[in-house]
Each structure stands twice: as structure tokens, then as C-alpha cells.
Amino acid sequence: MTPTEGTSPAGTSPAVSFRGAVKAYGDIRAVDGVDLRIERGETVALLGRNGAGKSTAIALLLGLCPPDAGSVELYGAAPERAVRAGRAGAMLQEARAVPRVTVGELVAFVAGRYPAPMPVGQALELAGIAPLAGRRVDRLSGGQVQRVRFAVALAGRPDLLVLDEPTAALDVEARQAFWESMRAYARRGSTVLFSTHYLEEADAHADRILVVDRGRVVADGTGDELRRAAGGSRVVVDVAGLPAGDPAPLPGVRSVEIRGDRALLRTEDSDATVTALAELGAIRGLEVVPASLDDAFLALTTPAPVPEEEKAMAKAKAKAKAKASVR
């Protein structure tokens, strides 16, 4: 599926719609003409290197900042309107613990801001923190605070749940429990959009993966589709067994990388590549390995911004926030 395709029934809007959305900080376009459509009920992962534009795209989606050009809608309405109505709930990275407030009090307060909130006990149960209801938020561990943020995101009973790096502070056991809770919520027919640096999480828990690079969506599909885009498979052989010359012209081979005494051939047709190698007698230490999502991610994205670029973007963002606060 491409970013602009959709399957919304006639008369209904998609959960998320970006049309030519642009957001710039100075000369840097954090979001650069994005066209994107997320259907109701989908679970979508957002992948990208640091500085790729993921957090800015989420800020646009939640109405935290307006696009400089194009449009962003949630369920056919302005993001701010959808958020106020409780249709979107978010778990963001930049959130601080509230002092002298218990977990139950915080979730109850947030739930009270929405027209049809989820019962507090149910939100705490889904987030796996019911036993912490009477504990002060500022005395919890990092992993426990992360789960409180999840309960807060659920408080309005949102149709769309937006999770920005939701498992960043969790250990392996807590991460597994979190994803069980997220899937339980998604099974109710809710739409989920999450960003993550854990590629295996995207592969395991998303119906669809969006790869963002330098402000643009550069890939959109399932994990298998992204792996095929990366070259399908890797054929690894001993360099000593290869014939003289460039092995790239072999059938199916898209690229060649030499690692010590081994050659890694990225190929779209591993059977054809292996057959050709066998005919040449070049099959010493032969291995055929399916392309991983890591391979796909690296093939689809550019290297991370150099420190000067990151500093320039941070400076531009700070300047934009300062102007907004003055207004």
C-alpha cells in the first residue's frame, strides 16, 4: 500500500490524513511535503533515525504545532478538535512526573477533561499499574512512570492512540507486558500509531511500517515488503572462491560488500544467484540468509545528521518555540 492509498468505507474519513504537510525550522524541513493516510483500525509503526522527522510529524498530528503548508486531519477534522473531543490520546517522550499527586488522582484528573472517558480503574488495569493507584507519581521508577503515561493516554478512551517511543525505559519483561496491553486495546478496533527504535517491535506489532527519512516517507508497507525492498536475501560466500572481477553482474545481485574474507551479496533472487555461483564453482562457505528489517532500514535511510545539522535543527526549534511563547 502506498501512503496515499486507502480503504475507508464511503462516507467516512481515515483516522489520519496528511496532505502535502510541511514543517520547517529555519532552513531545515523537518516534515517535507508528506502525503500519508492511516485507516481506522490499523496499527502502524513509524521508523526513522534521530532527526528524521518522526517527532515533528507526531506534533503536527496532535495539533501541537501547525503545518507551514499542506494539511493534517484526524477523522476528517482539525487535530486540536479531535484531541479535545477525546478521539486521540498520546504518550509522548517529553513528559515530567507531577509532584505530590498519586497515580489514581492523575489519571482521574485527565479522564475528567474528556466527554466520555474510560473508567480510571480500567485505564490503570490496561496499563498494568492498578496496584500503584495510591502511589505518588514522582516516587515511581522510570519504567513505572512510562506505564502511567500509557494510562493517561488511555484516559479519554481514544479512537487513535499515539505512542512516541513507548518502551524506551522498560526492561524486557515490562516491554512484553506493554505490547500485550497495546494489542488488547487495538483489538477493540482502535487505531494505533507508534514510533520506535526497536525494529523487532515494529515487525512484531504493526500491520504496516512507515519509514521516515529527512522529513519524507521513503517506505510504506509490511515488514516482508520492506525486506524485499532491501534486496530480499543475502548470499554470503568466501571471497577466495569468487572468480576474478566484479560479482555484481550475477543474476539478482543488487550490491556487493566485502567483509574480511567473506563477500556479502544482496540479491532479489537468491536461487538464481546461488545457481550462477555453483556454475562458476564459487560456493565455498556458502550461506543464504533472508534480509532482516535492519538491512531494509539501513538500505532505505541515509546516515544520521552530522552534529552540526542536529545543532542547527535544535537551535531553530528553540527559536520557533520562543516566538510562539511570546505570542
Image (cartoon, rainbow, N blue to C red):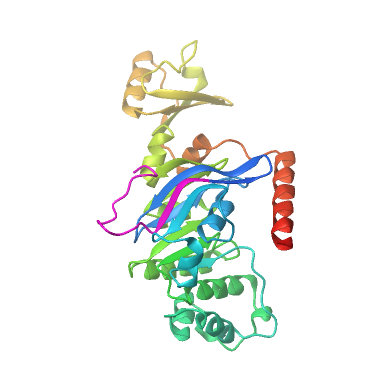
On the question of residue 153 being in view, the answer is yes
Q: Is residue 163 above or below residue 318?
A: below
Q: Residue at x 43, y 67 (%)?
A: 182
Please state the horizontal and vertical placement of residue 85, each as a whole percent of the image. Answer: 45, 72
Q: Is residue 3 left or right of residue 65?
A: left
Q: Specify the principal SS of the magenta part.
A: loop
The verdict on residue 5 being magenta is: yes
Q: Nearer the viewer, residue 273 or 320?
A: 320
Q: Quadrant of residue 147?
A: bottom right
Residue 324 place in picture, x, y as percent = 69, 59
In the image as oriented, which residue stretches furthest toward the front?
327
Numbered-mark total: 0
Query: Does any portion of residue 288 appear in the rendered image?
Result: no
Residue 272, how many percent across, how many down? 32, 23
Q: Quadrant of residue 13?
A: bottom left
* Residue nearest the viewer, comparing 182 with 25: 25
Q: Is residue 326 magenta?
A: no
**Residue at the farthest bottom position:** 134
Q: Quadrant of the N terminus?
A: top left
Q: Residue at x 74, y 45 (%)?
A: 311
Q: Residue placed farthest to the left in the image?
A: 10
Can you give x and y, in whole percent of width and height, for residue 161 in the image?
Answer: 45, 65
Of the 4 image quadrants, the one containing the C terminus is: bottom right
Front in this rendered view, residue 319 or 209: 319
The residue under the point 57% across, 65% down is 171
**Depth check, front residue: 243 or 137:** 137
Q: Quadrant of residue 15?
A: bottom left
- Rendered position, 130 above or below 183: below
Q: State the extent of the magenta-drawn residues as a range.
A: 1-21
